[in-house]
Image (spheres, rainbow, N blue to C red):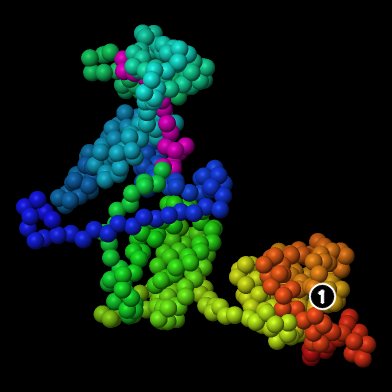
């Protein structure tokens, strides 16, 4: 309600966002989470560098140029306002630009440029706790030019004498307009000429990150987006919020994002937009129970349209985010009865999972000059990455011989082998160890495989004497252009 008690009201929704970490220490120590880049830090650095390059040159101040152009003055008249840029002119123009910006207070505090063109601010060095600092935190500081003693903070410094000496350093002080910088400590004066309490110098290039706020406000809606997409879905999560969380709470651009409650697919949409904006390589896995066919009729449809583009009801063509791939898998139960059929179903489903794990989906029908037999092994390659999934362990030696005769570009061939025992197969691939990487099946997959594996080896995988020798019959070799 407004203060007058009128019937006008504003609906406010509050949501709590919980973040779970498998390893909290790793998450925090590697600065992956709860930190973000200062939104305008690069703009500030670029502006400072642009102005700093003008020192020693004659140019028209940006403010004057913009004002005169708005009134349609000729360039000949505008050029009459050219001035010779020195350090003081650059600093004044930089600070005027900052004051007029809509940057945060913290960003605007970076209002100084040193004589190497680096942007910095000054920060209090006062003791932060309620009680006074220990005795070693009360050393006096003297103005590096006049030698007069500067005032001390009321509770002492936040650093001991040894640290303060290191901050001062042994290099000569640098004099600015109303500031003298000695090492990493800045000395300034009040208007009446007396010294201020010295402060610490912080450079923007070394402090590009800031803490993510625990409160985030967003009043946008995706109602129009869903109208344009032609999808009916009540109360979709806000795309801007998802982008904010993915880019600021988790800054790594190469992570895999898992959303157990996919809904309309906002997390996927946000992931693709972020990759488009910052050239990231994030991957996203969505999971939903497909209640009311939401996965097939909403989540998948939305993702597909975002990738391929769509036309709004008003006829506006929206370009797709084409540098993405969308794959849809449907889970199902596999009986644990020990039958060949169940085993085949399991290994096929697991192969799909291994493709997701390796981000490799293109199946090749041939491996070098050999035609693959899917019941024995399957080969996936995109030209750079390679993966062999082997269902018949007896094929290991033959595959090793084949690999020895093939030169493949890119990474080593990753090999997964389904075997009744946890055997590493190092001996079989010893001769080609420089070309292959043997990867153990994940424990959960191996355990499931053990449970459905028929007690008697399945006939389709048996190699008998009546059949030809395994080294000649597992794979068909091309000869004379024919298989």
Q: Secondary structure at mark 1?
A: helix
- Residue 320 appears anywhere in the view: no
**Relative horizontal placement of residue 456, taking residue 1 as reference (left or right):** right
Q: Position of residue 459 (x, y in %)?
A: 81, 87
Q: Depth check: give the residue in front, 73 or 113.
A: 113
Q: Which residues are magenta?
A: 195-210
Image quadrant containing the C terminus: bottom right
Residue reaching furthest to the front? 337
Residue reaching furthest to the right? 465
- Residue 234 appears anywhere in the view: yes
Q: Position of residue 131 (x, y in %)?
A: 38, 20
Query: What residue is at 42 percent from the left and 78 percent from the top?
Result: 291
Query: What residue is at 23 percent from the left and 18 percent from the top?
Result: 191
Tell me if residue 1 comes above or below residue 450 in the rendering. Answer: above
Which of the 4 quarters of the picture holds residue 141?
top left
Query: What residue is at 25 percent from the left and 38 percent from the top?
Result: 99
Judge the density around disc 1: few (<14), some (14-19), many (≥20) Cα neighbours within 10 Å: some
Q: Which residue is mark 1?
A: 393
Q: Depth check: give the residue in front, 350 or 408.
A: 350
């Amino acid at each position: 309600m407004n203060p007058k008690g009128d019937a006008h009201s504003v609906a406010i929704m509050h949501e709590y966002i919980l973040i779970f970490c498998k390893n909290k220490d790793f998450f925090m120590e590697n600065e992956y989470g709860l930190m973000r880049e200062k939104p305008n830090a690069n703009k500030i650095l670029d502006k400072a560098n642009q102005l700093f390059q003008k020192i020693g040159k004659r140019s028209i101040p940006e403010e004057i140029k913009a004002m005169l152009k708005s009134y349609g003055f000729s360039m000949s008249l505008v050029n009459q306002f050219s001035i010779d840029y020195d350090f003081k002119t650059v600093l004044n123009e930089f600070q005027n630009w900052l004051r007029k910006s809509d940057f945060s207070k913290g960003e605007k505090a970076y209002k100084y440029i040193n004589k190497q063109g680096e942007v910095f601010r000054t920060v209090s060095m006062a003791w932060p706790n309620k009680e006074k600092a220990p005795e070693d935190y009360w050393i006096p500081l003297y103005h590096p030019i006049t030698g007069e003693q500067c005032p001390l903070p009321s509770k002492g410094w936040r650093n001991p004498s040894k640290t303060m000496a290191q901050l001062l350093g042994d290099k000569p002080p640098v004099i600015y307009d109303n500031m003298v910088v000695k090492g990493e400590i800045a000395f300034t004066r009040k208007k009446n000429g007396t010294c201020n309490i010295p402060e610490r110098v912080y450079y923007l290039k070394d402090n590009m990150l800031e803490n993510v706020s625990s409160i985030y406000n967003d009043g946008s809606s995706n109602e129009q987006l869903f109208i344009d997409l032609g999808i009916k879905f009540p109360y979709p999560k806000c795309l801007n919020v998802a982008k904010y969380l993915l880019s600021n709470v988790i800054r790594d651009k190469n992570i895999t994002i898992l959303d157990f409650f996919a809904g309309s697919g906002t997390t996927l949409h946000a992931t693709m937009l972020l990759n488009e904006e910052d050239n990231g390589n994030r991957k996203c896995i969505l999971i939903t129970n497909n209640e009311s066919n939401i996965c097939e009729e909403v989540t998948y449809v939305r993702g597909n349209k975002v990738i391929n583009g769509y036309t709004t009801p008003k006829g506006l063509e929206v370009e797709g985010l084409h540098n993405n791939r969308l794959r849809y898998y449907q889970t199902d139960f596999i009986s644990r009865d020990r039958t060949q059929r169940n085993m085949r179903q399991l290994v096929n489903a697991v192969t799909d999972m291994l493709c997701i794990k390796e981000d490799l989906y293109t199946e090749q029908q041939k491996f070098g000059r050999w035609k693959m037999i899917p019941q024995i092994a399957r080969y996936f390659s995109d030209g750079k990455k390679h993966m062999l999934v082997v269902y018949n362990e007896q094929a290991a030696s033959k595959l090793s011989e084949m690999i020895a005769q093939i030169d493949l570009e890119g990474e080593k061939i990753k090999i997964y082998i389904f075997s009744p025992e946890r055997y590493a197969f190092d001996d079989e691939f010893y001769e080609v160890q420089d070309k292959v990487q043997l990867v153990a099946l994940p424990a959960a997959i191996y355990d499931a495989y053990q449970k459905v594996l028929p007690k008697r080896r399945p006939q389709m995988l048996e190699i008998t004497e009546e059949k030809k020798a395994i080294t000649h019959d597992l794979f068909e070799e091309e000869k004379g252009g024919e298989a």
